[in-house]
C-alpha cells in the first residue's frame, strides 16, 4: 500500500515536472518570438529581494536594524510595518519589473537597429 502511494506520488510529481518544462519551453519560444531575452529573467527577483531587504534586516537582525532606522517599536506597530513593507514591495516589484523590461526591450531594439545600420 505504501509503495503504491509513494509510486503514485513520484509519478504525479514527474508528470507535473514535465508539464512545467513543456510550459517553460513554450514560454521561452514566445519570448524569443517577441524579441525578449531570457538572460534578464533573474533581474526581477534581485529587485524584489532588494525591496524586502529592510524588512528582512529588521526581522532577522533587529540590533543591526536599530543602528540604521532606530527602534522597531511594539508588536502592533511591527504588524503595521510588515503590512506597509509588503504592500510597498509588491507595488515596487511590479513597477520595477515593467520599467526594467521596457528599458531592456528598448535597448535591444536600439542595439538591433545599430547593427542593421538604421
Image (tube, grey):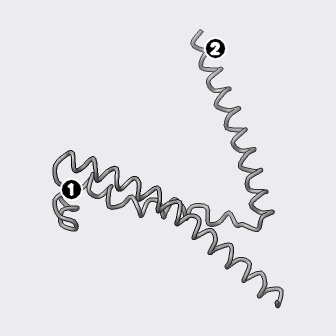
- Label 2 CA crowd tier, 10 Å (few <14, some 14–19, many 20+): few
- At mark 1, the secondary structure is helix
Instruction: Say which quarter of the image contains residue 113.
Output: bottom right
The image shows residue 10 at horizontal and vertical percentages of 63, 26
Judge by depth and name the residue closer to the eye, 98 or 27. Answer: 98
Instruction: First in sequence, mark 1 or 2: give its number.
Output: 2
Can you name the residue that lies furthest to the top here?
A: 1
Q: Residue at x 65, y 20 (%)?
A: 8
Residue drawn at point x = 72 percent, y = 38 percent: 18
Height in image: 110 above or below 28?
below
**Numbered circle sitting on residue 4:** 2
Q: Position of residue 20 (x, y in %)?
A: 69, 42
Residue 76, picture quadrant: top left
The residues bearing labels 1 and 2 have C-alpha atoms spaced at a distance of 48 Å
Looking at the image, which is closer to me, 77 or 12?
A: 77
x, y percentage for residue 66?
Answer: 18, 62
Badge number at residue 62: 1
The image quadrant that residue 106 belongs to is bottom right
Q: Could you tell me which residue is drawn at 78 percent across and 57 percent down?
A: 30
How many dots with numbers? 2
Amino acid at each position: 500500500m505504501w509503495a503504491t502511494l509513494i509510486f503514485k506520488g513520484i509519478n504525479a510529481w514527474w508528470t507535473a515536472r514535465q508539464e512545467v518544462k513543456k510550459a517553460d519551453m513554450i514560454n521561452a519560444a514566445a519570448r524569443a518570438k517577441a524579441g525578449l531575452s531570457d538572460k534578464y529573467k533573474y533581474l526581477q527577483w534581485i529587485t524584489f529581494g532588494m525591496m524586502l531587504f529592510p524588512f528582512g534586516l529588521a526581522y532577522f537582525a533587529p540590533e543591526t536594524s536599530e543602528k540604521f532606522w532606530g527602534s522597531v517599536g511594539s508588536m502592533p506597530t511591527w504588524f503595521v510595518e510588515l503590512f506597509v513593507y509588503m504592500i510597498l514591495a509588491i507595488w515596487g516589484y511590479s513597477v520595477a519589473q515593467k520599467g526594467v523590461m521596457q528599458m531592456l526591450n528598448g535597448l535591444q531594439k536600439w542595439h538591433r537597429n545599430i547593427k542593421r545600420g538604421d
